[in-house]
Structures are given as C-alpha cells and as structure tokens.
Image (cartoon, coloured by chain):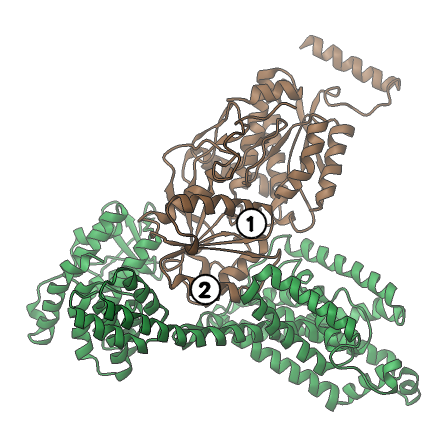
Amino acid sequence: MTFTQVLIRPLVLRLVCFTVFSAASCVYALTPAEVKGIASGEGDARIEALNKALINADDKTAAFLQALSEDAVKVAGEQVIVVKDDKGFDPITGAEIAIPDTAEDVMNNNRMRGELDTALATLKLFSKDEKVRGGSIKTLLSETDEAKLPLIEKAFEAETNPEFKDQLQLVRAAILLNSEDKTKRLEAAKLLSQSNNRNTKTVLLERLKTETEPDVKSALEATLRSVEASLAWGDKIGALFSGISLGSILLLVALGLAITYGLMGVINMAHGELMMIGAYATYVVQGIFQKYMPGAFDWYLVAAVPVAFFASALMGAALERGVIRYLYGRPLETLLATWGISLMLMQLARSVFGAQNVAVENPSWMSGGVQVLGNLSLPFNRLVIIGFACAVLLGVAWLISRTRLGLFVRGVTQNRPIAACMGVNTARVDTYAFALGSGIAGLAGCALSQIGNVGPDLGQSYIVDSFLVVVLGGVGQLAGTVYAALGLGILNKLLEGWTGAVLAKIAVLVLIIIFIQKRPQGIFAMKGRSAEA
Amino acid sequence: MQRRFTLKALTAAVALAGISALPAHAQSGGTIKVGILHSLSGTMAISETVLKDTVLMAIDEINAKGGVMGKKLEPVIVDPASNWPLFAEKTKQLLGQDKVSVIFGCWTSVSRKSVLPVVEEMNGLLFYPVQYEGEELSKNVFYTGAAPNQQAIPAVDYLMSKEGGGAKRWVLLGTDYVYPRTTNKILRAYLIKKGVKESDIDEKYTPFGHSDYQTIVADVKKFSAGGKTAVVSTINGDSNVPFYKELGNAGLKAKDVPVVAFSVGEEELRGVDTKPLVGHLAAWNYFQSIKNPTNTEFIKKWSAYAKDKKIAGHMDKPLTNDPMEATYIGINMWKQAVEKAKSTDTDKVIAAMAGQTFKAPSGIVSKMDEKNHHLHKSVFIGEIKADGQFNVVWKTPGPVKAKPWSPYIEGNASKPDEPVKK
C-alpha cells in the first residue's frame, strides 16, 4: 500500500478540517477525470487514479467506490454510469441518465477488488455507524503499512466503543511491528499476544524473517506461541464442529433407512433416490417462489420442507403398494427390485429435469457464518442442518415411541402374526411405516440441497453411507443410528485432519469392517426373544 | 458426375439384386462413416452428451456444404455409458464392424487409456477434445485439448504476477486420479524451479464424489495465515459445488485466497448457485464470453442447432465451452485433412493433418503441430461472473505450442516430440 504515504496527510488534514471547521470550507470533490480514471484503463493506472482520488475523497467518492466494488458501474465512451435498480445515474451530479446499449460493465479483478476494499475501509473508519466501523477495522487487520499509522491513531482516539478500541490497538500494534524504533517494536510484540486473529500470525511470521534484534526476536517468538495457542483452540473446536456437522448429515440420510431397513427389514436400494426426489421437490418449490413470490424468496425453504416430505412419502407409499409388499421376507429379490427402481427413478429425473445438475440457492439467512473465535466461524447452513437433524430425530422418536402408529409399527415389526391377531391391519401399517421412512429421506434430500449438488445421481453418493450407519448402529435401533452417525462423522473428520481425505475414507471403512467382524449385531443389539424373529 | 452416378446405380443394382447382403462399408454407400464415442449415460453424461451434439452439428454443417470429397458424412453413435472397459469394446465395434474412418470421443483420461490399445492395434483414428495431463503421444490420436503447459503452467504464472495477486504459497488440491496427480507433479516441479519452498506447497487429494470440504477449507485457511496463498484446483465434476460453497461460508473470498480451476467451465457452472464463486478463476483455451466474429457465429450456430434439435438445457440457455470448441476444431481439421489426402485412409490422413490450420472460435488461427499431434492454443484466464460466464482477465500473447512430455517430469527430456514408430 504505497499510496497511503501520499494519501495520509491530506486525509488527516481533511478530517481536521471536518471536525474543527465547518464542512463547507473543504473544497475537494470527485472530478469526472478521476471517475474515468478509476473506472477504465489498465490495472496499474486505475489503482493510481484510485489513490489520487482518495486524497480528495468525499461522500460521493465513497458512494462511487461502493458501487464499483458491487460491480454496479458501466462505461459508455466518456460517460461513467452508476447503475441502481436498472436506472443509470451520473456518479458526480447524481442526476439520472439513460444507459446506452453500448455501455460495458466495468470489470474488477481480484487485485482491484482488494484495493477498493482497503480504500473503502479507510474512508469508513470515521463513520458514525458502529457496524460500518467494525467492518472496516476487520478489513484493516492485515494492514502493515506504517504510513497508515497516524490515521489509525486518530481513529483510535476518536473511537468510543471499547471493543473497537482494543481492535484498533491491535491494528496499530501490527503496524508498529515494522517500526524503526526498537522499543516500539517490543511494545507492539507484547500487545499482539492478546490477538486471536489469523492475520496476526501472518504479520508476526513476516516480521520474524527480517528481525535482527535478539530481544525483540524472543518477544516475537513468545507472542507467536501465545497467538498460535489461542488459534489452536479455534482449530480444535472447528474440527469437532465439522465432525458434528458431518454426523448430522449422516443421521439425516440414515434415519429414514433406520425405519425402512432397520425396523421393517426392507433392503431399500432406492433410499438414495427418495432423497433425490426430496431435493428436486425443493428445487421445484424454489422455482415457484422465484416466479410467483420473489418477495418471500428467502422463506422458500420453509415451504419446501413439507413438500419434500410428502413428495417422497407418496412415492414411498406407491413403491410399497406396487412392489415391495409382494416381496416381504425375500431380501434378495427386494434388493434387486429396489435397485431396479432406483435406476428407473434416476432416469425419470433425467428425463424430466435433464442430466445436468440444477441450481438450488441458499436463502440469504443460510449464507455466510457466525464468527465465534478469531479464527473460527461456523457456517449458518451447517448450523441450520444440525438443528434440523435434531428436530427430525425428536419427531421420529416421538412418533415411534408415543403415538398409536408408532405402537403399531413396533408391534408389527416385533411379531407380525400376533399383531394381526390383535386386529392390527398389518398391511396398512407397513405402508404407513414405509411412507414415513421415505418421507424422512425426502427431508434429508431437502437438507442436502443446501450443501451440495442436486442432480439425478444425488442419492448414489449417500446410499452406502446410510447403510453403513444403520448397520453399525445396530439394525432395529434408532438410538444406535444416532450414535453411529455422530461417531462416524467425528471419527471421519479427525482422521481426515490427520491423514487426508482419501486415507481417512479407507481407514474408516477398515475400522467398520473390523468392528462388524467383532460385533456383527452393531453397537446396540436387540435383546430378548424378538431378536431372533 | 456421370461416372459417379453410374457407379452409384451399379452399387444399387447390385444391392437390389441381393447378390451382396453385406452391410454397407465405409465408402460403398457414398458416405463416410464417423464414429462418436461419448458417454450418453452414467456420471460423465453431464459433460459428454453435449460433445456428441457438437459433432452432429458439425456433420450437419459439413453435409449442407456438400460433404467431404462429395460424400456425405454419416454419424455412428455409440454409448460407452461412463464405463471404461466398455469404451474399448465400443471402439472395437466402431472400427471392426461399422468400419468408421474416424472416431471423435472420450473425456476422462482413463477412458482414453482404455481406447488407446484398440485404436493403435486396429490402426484407427481418434480425436480427443479435452484438456489432459500429457505423458502420451500416439500416432493414432490427435489431441485437440490442452496439454499441461497450455493450461496449468500459464495459470500459475498469472497467480504469481502482480496483477494476479502475487501468490507465495500454494495449495494443490485435486480429485485422486491420474490427471490431478500428474498435473500437480508438474506444477510442484515448476514452482520449485521458480523458487517456491517445499514447505510453501501443500498437496491434497479427495476421493471421487467427495462432498464434505470442511476440513480441507479449514486447512486452506490455516495455511493461508503463512502468506499470500492461491489454490490450484483439479477437483473434478460434482465435488466443485460443495467445495466452493464451503469456501464462501468460511469467509475466504477470491481476493484473499483465489482458486484457479482447470475443470470448471460454462457447462459445469450451469447447475450452480454462482454467488459464492464470483472472482474465482478458471484457465481454458476458450470461453463463451470471448468476443470475435468467429465465436459469435459459432455461438449462433450452436443456439440455432440446440433449439432445432430441442437439446435439453441448451434450447433455453445455449452454452458453449472449451471441449466443444476443441471438438469443433477437430472435426473441421479432419475434413480438411481428408480433402488434402484425397482419401480416408488412416495413414494418409495422419500425414495430411500435420500443419493444418483452422480459424478457431477462440479468436486465433489454430494450427495442428507438424509433428506432435497437438494443437497450438492461446491460454485465457477468466474470472467467474455472477451469471455463470467468465470475464477474461489475462491471456497469452499468442498461441502456445503443446509439450505433451512435460520437461518438469524426470526422464522426459530425452523423449522425442513426435509419435514413436513401433
């Protein structure tokens, strides 16, 4: 950031003139030449123009840079146009102007975008809005240019929010780390030990490479150790979280199977395709919202959940009525028949929606993440899916253990003839139970659409995992499924961090084989007479 | 004219008389048979189906202009169903039974490796249109996709440059199979030659169909604390979406850690919510967004053809991509070579292919190298835009000659830059 050397003094001057005198005494403004220079030309020239414009920056400059960083600027010949809601505006006068057909979008590459962000952050450091200030401090955390120091110190003194004051202190320290003055470097190194930000580590490492004074060097090393220690915590929690998140996904995909295979004993190879139906149902609902209710688009997922459930449940019921009920007690035939059905369902999806994957967007409240520690941010979509998995699990547990339908299902699976003797319509219970399992697969599909691809092959990548979870947990046990899903998720993630994704997958499979050899009945075995049935 | 008519009439008469019950051979019916060997079902159908349509479009176009040497082209389509051994079987069928003069086909390297011995043994002719890892040079194959030095190495050069962000540390991330492994081997050697330390390179692989990128993204984030980092991604197919989504959610933006991908093009972005991808890069030899008259015409032709034939997806939103362009160049060059050789005989066509030129949609005059069976290609770096298209931010000054035997792999220095006669 060499431009800051040129820019700082006038900026500070201007700030002084803003605070001490009235704003009217400042005569700086955005000029057409500056606008043109920033918006078009080669990278180096544009950045130079940007830096020059920053010296005389005013609100219009900030607004223009904001529009640029949002890719909402077009150029037509000599005219630069800011586009807002499909209407063109002049960046200097603010007057509305027509957008000619020849207008071309202004393209920013990553380097330009970085420069724009830093420029905007510098301008926003004195904003009245706390949120804006907080954001700009975060952007500046990796800044190390000493020329920025007066500005940061100015902002530090003006800052009233103690949290921001601390952060600005860290920004200041990071810059002072490269100071000529040895005592300042020492002071900075000590200050930085409170940081739990990854950028601090980058800064420290850079400095360590060039530092020659032994006592500063040892202070730097001590600080680096303490920063790394606090970062390590974030990493550990992050690994655990990703394990739980994977576990929650495994749980969702396996829960439906825990009913159809676990309780009913149907080896359902089409389970993955029932998930696919749920995912496509989500896609269809998204399309309807996009077309008819664009205002409520963010909430399409709420409507998609029941639709996905019922779409898959209906398909499941049709399968059970049409095919599977003729095959009870014949596992091999069931396996083949459901595998055939899975191929047919995939081809059906291909014919209806095309072989290509379809795009399912995250609603805005599921994009991004929440910053927990300096280096740990938990993505919203995974948090939502963990919550969703818990809700589905509780729902299923309640349904199986507390309702009449659940009682019938348990009764029929434990002893079919006796249940029939008691007057239970076993055929209907079978249909309901299978539809329930399929519906849960649909819910899983709805959740999967938020983290991965939606395509005809969606189910194929999860079918093996879901069988693994159910078998490992112990067939016929919901609780076992939960433990197996979470266990596999966390184990997988721990191994992956240690050996890499390919070996981790192999290692997990080997461990499962060994486990099943030693304990064929799974983690939880059915006890009592029903176990032999 | 007169004589050909008599010949035709004679053949017809012979056929009618029932003396010959043999199936029509390559040239006997007045047509030249062209084999199309692309998966129309299975996992690769997503990418390969459209190449079959590209060949058909080019055949229609050539036939409309009078065919090749006055004979119409007749497509023979087979479906190897993303099944690698089946690729070899279908090739045997195309060459042995259907007696096609040329085959356009394959996408994955493993399918090409499966076809290779058959084509060589039966002296067939294969045009392979996809970027690949090099390390191969067969007399019977023409490679119209990029070799590593026409895609991977320029991309790394760009990321190292000031304009590309000046990356110092590198994550080489790929799916675990031959193309990423070989490409990364070449890149590692290249980076080390450029002065990058071993500790600044992190090589990672994931299984096919991997969908949980949390750990990998966390590792990339950790790694990037040590200095400006760029990710070179050879992640294949479907896994790209979860990877980019995770990257976006973890707050790693393209301006902090840019990702350059070698397998993500317009077609792959079709089914993707592109918001988290904006600003990330791809390196190809063609982008749909390239502006020149040849490309405009190519896109227009494809849009009309897709609409006419009701090709799923493309009839509403026609897209073109790099392998489609490579296929299109391939079939047109083959046509020129046949006309030059005045024969469809494999050896004569191979000889005539050397030095053929064709005005490519990418805006250059594409040339088949005189010796090494690869095209000379320009390299473009594009940034992903929100609409799924690419904004070209950098390109090579001119076409680059392919080096199928990368000098960055040991033992390649002594290998000749042309097919070895067996």
- Tell which of A148 and A124 is nearer to you: A148
Query: Residue B55's spot in the image, x, y percent?
Result: 61, 35
- Tell which of B252 and B338 is nearer to you: B252
Quarter of the image containing the C terminus of chain B?
top right
- Crowding around mark 2 (Cα neighbors within 10 Å: few <14, some 14 to 19, many 20+) is many
- Residue drawn at x 36%, y 35% is B397
What chain is tagged by disc 1?
A: B
Report which residue position mark 2 lands on: B248
Report which residue position mark 1 lands on: B316
Image quadrant in which you'd find residue A368:
bottom left
Query: Residue B301's spot in the image, x, y percent?
Result: 53, 36
- Tell which of A448 and A486 is nearer to you: A486
Whichever of callouts 1 and 2 sits on the residue coming sooner in the sequence is 2
- Residue drawn at x 48%, y 33% is B402
The chain in green: A
- Residue drawn at x 51%, y 67% is A362
- Asked if residue A516 lies left or right of residue A84, the reply is right
- Asked if residue A328 lies left or right of residue A359, the reply is right
Query: Residue B297's spot in the image, x, y percent?
Result: 48, 35
**Does dot 2 land on a helix, a strand or a loop?**
helix
* Alpha carbon separation for disc pair 1 and 2: 29 Å
Name the kind of residue labelled 1 in the image: Asp
